[in-house]
Amino acid sequence: MNEPDVLYDVADRIATVTLNRPERMNAFTAALGHQLRAAMRRATDDPGVRAIILTGAGRGFCAGADMDNLSAGTASGGANFNAESAAGPAPFDASSSPDYQTPHSYFPAIPKPIIAAINGACAGLGLVYALYCDQRFAAAGAKFTTAFARRGLIAEHGISHTLPRLVGLSKALDLLVSARKFDADEALRLGVVDQVLPPDQLMGAARAYALDLADNVSPRSMAVIKRQLWAVDQQTMRQAIDVGNAEMQLSFGSADFKEGVAHFVEKRPARFTGH
């Protein structure tokens, strides 16, 4: 029996989602995409999961779209690829921003922090998904590339928005137009990733970060703050202030606010419920 293209595991209130096509550097296919979405749905709906780690099996994180699929697309004038992208699944969260209702842009609609543990090659569509995560930890030696321009393609699936958001317009233009390879150290300098770790420490660091969130932070607060930050590009400063003030009033009435004060005053570990 073949292994699934995506593995799912929960421990210590952390869901670990692993892209599992190591023989193809976890290259993206429609089947992998469906299984990834199902795993993220499972983690979202499980009240016992507080944080999510996304990583890859073997030597790569995700080497982009599977080249066999791209070859089939060229034979049909791109029809296969375009039909799949246009049809897409139902919105991951129909109440979320329309920005997060396309086939690949749904990570920001997930009300839990997603940490990418980038263990190796991260290219094309793999980089798109890494940039939709909320934090990115990379193994030293991991290689990155946007890849698209060297395949006769363009900045797809929102990377023209997410990449300059992190690195600025001119640096994003360089990475997208040249499609050059860059390593984890440069990714850190540019702001593409948040931490670079020795390969044997990558998952430990990602898990330690996720565990701190799971144990010590209000799930309700994380969900609201994530929603605020992903929405800010579509807001004026005044709109962000108004949203923040309204959310603060709601927070004052929450069980997690009462617990946040109580555990601090009583000098004990927090017991947040997410309510």
Image (cartoon, grey):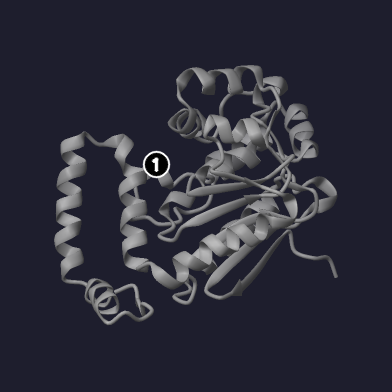
Q: Looking at the image, which is closer to me, 155 or 16?
A: 16
Q: Is residue 65 visible?
A: no
Q: Is residue 242 above or below residue 74?
A: below
Mark 1 element type: helix
Q: Looking at the image, which is closer to me, 203 or 78?
A: 203
Asked whether, in this view, residue 195 is left or right of residue 140, the answer is: left
Asked whether, in this view, residue 143 is left or right of residue 154, the answer is: right
Q: Quadrant of the N terminus?
A: bottom right
Q: Is residue 125 visible?
A: yes
Q: Is residue 23 above or below residue 78?
A: below
**Residue shown at 78% from the left, 36% from the top:** 67
Rendering coords of residue 184 (x, y %):
66, 37
Q: Looking at the image, which is closer to me, 190 or 265?
A: 265
Rendering coords of residue 22 (x, y %):
81, 52
Residue, disc 1 = 99
Rendering coords of residue 24 (x, y %):
82, 46
Q: Please, what is the three-letter code of the amino acid marked with disc 1?
A: Asp
Rendering coords of residue 252 (x, y %):
16, 67
**Residue shown at 32% from the left, 66% from the top:** 220
Q: Quadrant of the C terminus?
A: bottom left
